Image (cartoon, coloured by chain):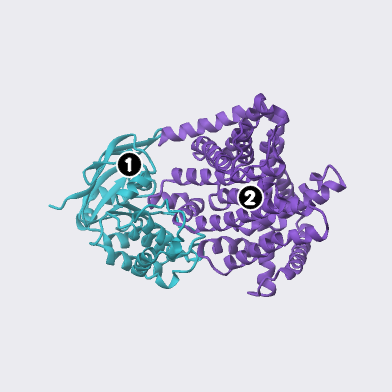
Chain colours: A purple, B cyan
């Protein structure tokens, strides 16, 4: 585990072999997605394409969140707000007859950027738990504002009159076109986020995550860098929201629900933060779990929950970390062919199993400590959800207030 | 007479009832190495934190090159030419040694709001960073992660980072702390090479290092400067001897 943990940030920092690995894995995923239409045609059903579109859209959202979590160390618990804002902005202009790409897309991006700027200006002054709570509070605010937009459907949501038109033509109505648009935007996001993380700006952002004291001492004031990252990530997620609204030709407050924000975090952590292929793999895995498990039972999250706890205990590098660790052990540098993806996943599973067995032995040897640790992990995993549920909306303003208070105090001290 | 780079004017700071700085006045002259010594708890670290901007003094002024910087943030002071090392080393553990220094170069050369070009490929940054690493004999470790460096190497890396900032004032907070005899000897040799080329304010416990490096020494006891002057004069000072009761200085 420590190996995997160390390997990933190192790669992100210095662009070593593991980064190339990240690119190979991502390329494999893109090829897999791009070949979905063929599979879909042979199965004579558009179901696969629909799933593929969702994977691409949520992968964009997860990548934008990774920019905050992985590069910036800012765990936003309100990222789904941008999904909703992007979709609402495009849907609202469409409902007024401006459902054309040249208006709807800029509207979606501008609205999410503005929301990010306004809320980020306060949120990025806080760190840790306060940042989590403030972003959650702002997202809940957006959620309830959307619920009260009676003119645009309120609780029931807003049906778009049509998908966004391009030059007056409904070409996004064509499923294949829309699918490839989503995929193309995902690839562009993947490449763009990669450039950003490696750029001067990205290096400062990563440096601030690593050691803020050192960064201040060499002259970087954190605020503007973090705010800029928040705005960029917000607009990127707004883009995902724009696509999501287009896919459903519908938007509702549920897009911004805090559960959705939690799911985005899960995608990033499940896939493996500190990499770019991780969040995409996380989105893929989460949506596939959702698709398959939700057929078995409507309480499918009961299965996902414990799986996540196990993941946190045994594979902190996520799916990407597990694959990387297995590859390092088995065949360093071997090209990752698409046909071997299954083997890799199996191998990763074996490695996890192995680690699990070892940990199991440790569990038996030192039961008290391990039990305590597991209990802590489970409690930590449940805490935010439970707290948010318990307090509901009443709790949120006071939490935000507390966050604001510390912020103000910190300002005063400065 | 040489011009003063840094002037402290009646700096006072307390934590509750504890006075850590009592009307401290001090001048650091251009090009000199000025050491601050004092027994444990004398307020040395609080003083350097006030100078670097991590702590706000209750009263008094900090003047840097004729400019009042008392209320400026750490980052703003760094932009003016402050550079520092920390008693507990502060490096970017997940970045290579080269990148640690390159970031310091980046901070003073052009905007960091550049979003597209890979920073690791900027030859000008890397060249300057490598030169700085070389000046503390760390060039061979350029591509090692800072977190994997030895303690002494991290100390050197901090100095390399500070030098890359092209500092007008170098604040060194106990650079020898935690270093072994051999490491201390080589750190002193490194600092000796820098001496004279930079204006240095050195807070240090290691008396051997202080007397080897300092042009002037100020002695801080219980938040007050009780003596200030050339090493020989300070060594002979009766109050200083009393403060360091029994310790050989």
Q: Do labels 1 and 2 touch, CB within 8 Å?
A: no
Q: Is residue B189 left or right of residue A278?
A: left
Q: Is residue A51 left or right of residue B80?
A: right
User: In the depicted view, which residue is nearer to us: B70 or A250?
Assistant: A250
- Considering depth in this image, is A157 or A347 the residue closer to the camera? A157
The quarter in which the N terminus of chain A is drawn is bottom right
Which residue is found at the position 36% from the left and 65% from the top? B124
Residue A331 higher or lower than B197, as above or below: below
Does A50 appear above or below A327? above
Instruction: Let me know if residue B175 appears in the view.
Output: no
User: Pointer 1: what residue?
Assistant: B223
Q: Is mark 1 on a helix, strand or loop?
A: loop
Tell me which chain the residue with mark 1 is part of: B
Q: Residue at x 69, y 63 (%)?
A: A322
Q: Name the residue under label 2.
A: A62
For disc 2, the chain is A
Question: Looking at the picture, how far across and down is residue A367, in whole percent?
Answer: 77, 54
**x and y percent of residue A254 in the render?**
70, 35
Residue A313 at what x, y percent from top left? Answer: 71, 54
């Amino acid at each position: 585990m420590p190996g995997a943990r160390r390997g990933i940030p190192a790669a992100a920092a210095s662009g070593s072999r593991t980064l190339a690995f990240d690119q190979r894995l991502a390329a494999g995923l893109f090829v897999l997605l791009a070949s979905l239409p063929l599979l879909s045609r042979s199965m004579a059903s558009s179901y696969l394409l629909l799933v593929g579109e969702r994977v691409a859209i949520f992968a964009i959202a997860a990548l934008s969140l990774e920019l905050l979590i992985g590069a910036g160390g800012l765990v936003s618990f309100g990222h789904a707000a941008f999904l909703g804002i992007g979709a609402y902005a495009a849907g609202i202009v469409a409902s007024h007859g401006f459902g054309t790409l040249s208006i709807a897309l800029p509207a979606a991006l501008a609205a999410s950027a503005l929301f990010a700027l306004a809320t980020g200006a306060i949120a990025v002054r806080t760190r840790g738990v306060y940042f989590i709570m403030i972003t959650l509070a702002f997202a809940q605010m957006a959620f309830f504002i959307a619920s009260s937009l009676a003119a645009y459907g309120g609780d029931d949501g807003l049906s778009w009159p049509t998908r966004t038109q391009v030059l007056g033509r409904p070409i996004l109505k064509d499923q294949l076109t829309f699918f490839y648009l989503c995929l193309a935007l995902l690839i562009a996001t993947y490449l763009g986020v990669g450039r950003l993380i490696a750029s001067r700006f990205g290096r400062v952002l990563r440096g601030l995550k690593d050691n803020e004291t050192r960064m201040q001492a060499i002259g970087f004031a954190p605020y503007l860098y973090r705010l800029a990252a928040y705005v960029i990530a917000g607009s990127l997620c707004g883009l995902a929201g724009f696509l999501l609204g287009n896919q459903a030709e519908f938007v509702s407050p549920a897009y911004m629900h805090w559960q959705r924000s939690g799911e985005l975090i899960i995608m990033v952590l499940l896939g493996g933060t500190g990499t770019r292929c991780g969040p995409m793999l996380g989105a893929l895995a989460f949506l596939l779990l959702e698709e398959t498990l939700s057929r078995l039972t409507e309480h499918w999250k009961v299965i996902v929950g414990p799986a996540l706890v196990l993941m946190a205990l045994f594979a902190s590098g996520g799916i990407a970390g597990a694959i990387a660790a297995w590859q390092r052990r088995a065949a360093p540098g071997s090209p990752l062919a698409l046909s071997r993806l299954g083997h890799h996943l199996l191998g990763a599973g074996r490695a996890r199993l192995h680690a699990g067995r070892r940990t199991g032995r440790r569990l038996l040897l030192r039961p008290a400590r391990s039990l305590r640790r597991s209990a802590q992990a489970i409690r930590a995993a449940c805490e935010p959800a439970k707290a948010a549920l318990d307090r509901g909306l009443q709790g949120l303003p006071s939490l935000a207030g507390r966050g604001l208070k510390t912020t103000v105090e910190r300002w005063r001290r400065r | 007479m040489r011009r003063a780079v840094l002037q402290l004017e009646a700096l006072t700071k307390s934590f509750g009832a504890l006075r850590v700085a009592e009307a401290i006045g001090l001048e650091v002259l251009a090009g000199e190495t000025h050491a601050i010594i004092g027994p444990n708890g004398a307020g040395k670290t609080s003083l350097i934190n006030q100078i670097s901007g991590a702590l706000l003094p209750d009263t008094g002024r900090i003047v840097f090159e004729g400019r009042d910087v008392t209320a400026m943030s750490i980052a703003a002071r760094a932009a003016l030419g402050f550079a520092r090392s920390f008693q507990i080393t502060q490096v970017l553990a997940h970045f290579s040694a080269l990148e640690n220094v390159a970031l310091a170069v980046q901070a003073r050369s052009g905007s960091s709001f550049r979003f597209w070009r890979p920073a690791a490929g900027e030859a000008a940054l890397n060249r300057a960073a490598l030169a700085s690493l070389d000046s503390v004999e760390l060039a061979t470790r350029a591509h090692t992660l800072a977190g994997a460096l030895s303690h002494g190497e991290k100390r050197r890396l901090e100095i390399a980072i500070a030098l890359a900032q092209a500092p007008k004032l170098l604040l060194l907070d106990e650079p020898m702390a935690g270093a072994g005899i051999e490491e201390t000897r080589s750190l002193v040799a490194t600092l000796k090479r820098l001496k004279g080329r930079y204006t240095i304010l050195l807070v240090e416990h290691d008396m051997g290092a202080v007397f080897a490096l300092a042009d002037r020494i100020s002695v801080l006891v219980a938040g007050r400067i009780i003596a200030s002057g050339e090493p020989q004069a300070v060594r002979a000072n009766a109050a200083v001897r009393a403060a360091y009761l029994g310790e050989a200085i």
